[in-house]
Image (tube, rainbow, N blue to C red):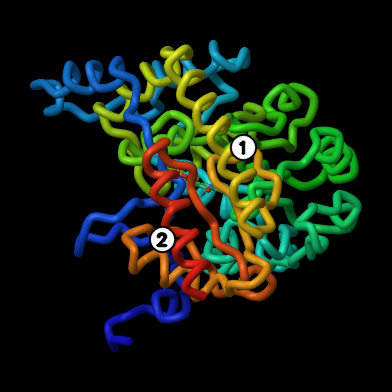
Amino acid sequence: MSKYWSAITENIRPYVPGEQPKDRKYIKLNTNENPYPPSPEVIKAIKQAANETLRLYPDPAGDDLRATLARYYEVKKEQVFVGNGSDEILAFSFPAFFTPGKPVLYPDITYSFYPVYCNLFHIDYELVPLDEEFTVPADAFYKKNGGIVLANPNAPTGKCMPLHSIRSILERNPDSVVIIDEAYIDFGGESAVAMIKEYPNLLVIQTLSKSRSLAGLRVGFALGHEDLIEGLRRIKDSMNSYTLDRLALAGAQEAIKDESYFRQTTKKIIALREKTSEELRRLGFKVIPSCANFIFISHQRCPAGELFQQLRGKGVLVRYFNLPRIDNYLRVTIGSDEEMSSFLKAVKESIAET
Ligand SMILES: *Cc1c(COP(=O)(O)O)cnc(C)c1O
């Protein structure tokens, strides 16, 4: 608290990111980063862009990157928006499409940034309870609302929603914007991107942070009807016209173009996710079937909070959310082969100690 804070600053409840510790070297399985480096083409392009042109502002619209994304997803450039990470695009979306007094719907267990934006922009929300297996009940979204936000695959559960459920939610809500946050879609699940041509109220948001190994570059994008994209641009240009710098624009383009590299790395992560899930089940864990680059697990005997601390003591960082309904679960990012071997070794030791 400070007497210099505005009422806004005093009343917000900021998001708490997973820790990036500096005290010792951890095996970091807590923020869903990709264990593989970005494509060598990305590094090359960034190095090439690091020249005297940094004197100049970047293209405020990010047109070259938008054109690359438009070609890749077979949409028009006017249907693409680029932002400084998908978190920024989500942040723009709340004031762009949602209105105070008209509650937005999203699941009770989902990405914890959504309530932060609602709080910041004074947008009311109603939580839709997931069932015991963390399934999203599509029919709970067939009611009056001021907008809908769904992460697919969901976070932190990793569960994906069938496309026909998303289609029925879109059919029943022609008057609200439906945002599908597809941060993890490249690791499984069916993308809703093709449906943007059919539904003018659908906005699909993706990121280069996870499947393209570029969490440090801060690039996300959204695909939707031209009018939605124009809405996002109006908000962006009321805050900061140059959200993506020259280096990010240059690197992001190559990340999209190097399709084969990205296919290889995602394939490895998916295979290791399945293998790790199997091993954990053998060790007495419940593992929610995942379509993402992480798994959500709960041990039948060892409480998640204690396991989290034990693993931390052994140099393995995972994510623990001390929140209703999920306080006996751990979210574990799928790392490299070596990292997952060390993780499993630490898990076995921890269970034996409990
Ligand atoms: C990681 C994540 C994002 C944000 O990613 P950026 O790094 O900001 O692009 C958005 N939504 C979900 C569900 C995520 O897990």
- Direction from residue 103 to residue 84 in the image, left or right: left
Would you place residue 210 above or below residue 120 in this image? above
Residue 165 in the figure: left or right of residue 113: right
Kind of residue at disc 1: Glu
What mark, if any, has residue 224 been given in the picture?
A: none
Q: Residue at x 51, y 32 (%)?
A: 269
**Picture residue at 86% right of the left edge, 34% below the top:** 164
Compared to residue 327, the image places residue 229 above or below, namely: above
| Left or right relative to 88: residue 284 | right
Tell me where residue 84 appears, x and y as whole percent.
39, 40
- Residue 159 at what x, y percent from top left? 70, 46
Residue positioned 85% across, 40% down in the render: 165
Quarter of the image where one finds residue 278: top right
Say whether disc 1 or disc 2 marks the residue closer to the N-terminus: 2
Specify whether residue 82 is in view: yes
In depth, the one of 174 and 318 nearer the eye is 318
Q: Which residue is mark 2?
A: 17
Secondary structure beneath dot 2 equals loop
The foreground one among 186 and 140 is: 186
Q: Position of residue 214 (x, y in %)?
A: 36, 34
Number of the front mark, 1 or 2:
1
Q: Quadrant of the N terminus?
A: bottom left
Residue 237 visible: no
Residue type at numbered disc 2: Pro
* C-beta proximity under 8 Å, tags 1 and 2: no
- Residue of label 1: 274
- Tag 1, which secondary structure? helix
- How many numbered marks have been drawn onto this rendered protein structure? 2
Q: Is residue 27 left or right of residue 168?
A: left
Residue displayed at 30% across by 15% down: 41
Q: Residue furthest front?
A: 352
